[in-house]
């Protein structure tokens, strides 16, 4: 536990220095618990104009385990978001680095960067929100003109209407 506290204090100092260098991420530690953090991520150039993400500010909450950095933090959106890789009720995020691809080299700041990247490039094949994943799949396949049947995972209504 001492090592995780030391690592989090080091990250806290880094965050204080990085505020000017990375204005898109505002990370803050809870005043009474170093294992609880919040973040505001600003999305400045995400997706096409006139989308809900463009210019948006989204709030995240971090719960850091005592085994950090050997185990990943639990991160979820507090801001409601319609995204294939975010559970619409809990805000849970489906991102490999928060599960099986975690490395102690990741920091809370770099996790925020990865979440911003996920928002720009959703993974509809690994959705927590199936409705959103299906819409992204449908939009992508219509845009490129190639409709892979396996990409629809049994969504007969959509695939039938597209193939007819």
Image (tube, rainbow, N blue to C red):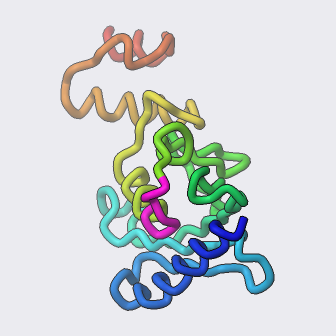
**Front one among 109 and 83:** 109
The C terminus: image quadrant: top left
Relative image position of residue 121 (x, y in whole percent): 35, 47
The answer to whether residue 71 is visible is yes
Q: Residue at x 34, y 17 (%)?
A: 162
Give left or right: position of 44 versus 4. Answer: left
Residue 49 versus residue 2: which sits nearer the camera? 2
Q: Start and end of the magenta stretch?
A: 104-110
The residue shown at (41%, 50%) is: 118
Tell me: residue 159, above or below residue 96: above
State the residue lying farthest toward the front: 2
Residue placed furthest toward the right = 32
Above or below: residue 124 compared with residue 163: below
Q: In the figure, residue 69 lies in which quadrant?
A: bottom right
| Residue beneath the point at 49% across and 55% down | 104
Image coordinates for residue 68, horizontal then vertical, percent: 62, 59
The image position of residue 112, as x and y in percent, is: 47, 64
Q: Is residue 119 above or below residue 44?
A: above
């Amino acid at each position: 536990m001492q090592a995780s506290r030391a690592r989090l204090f080091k990250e806290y100092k880094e965050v204080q220095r990085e505020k000017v260098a990375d204005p898109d991420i505002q990370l803050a530690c809870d005043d009474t618990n170093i294992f609880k953090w919040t973040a505001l991520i600003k999305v400045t150039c995400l997706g096409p104009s006139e989308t809900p993400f463009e210019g948006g500010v989204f709030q995240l909450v971090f719960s850091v385990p005592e085994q950090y950095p050997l185990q990943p933090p639990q991160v979820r959106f507090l801001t409601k978001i319609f995204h294939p890789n975010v559970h619409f009720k809990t805000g849970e995020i489906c991102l490999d680095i928060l599960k099986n691809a975690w490395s102690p080299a990741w920091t809370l700041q770099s996790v925020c960067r990865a979440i911003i990247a996920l928002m720009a490039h959703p993974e509809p094949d690994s959705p927590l929100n199936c409705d959103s994943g299906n819409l992204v799949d449908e939009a992508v396949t219509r845009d490129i003109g190639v409709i892979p049947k396996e990409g629809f995972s049994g969504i007969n209504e959509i695939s039938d209407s597209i193939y007819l």
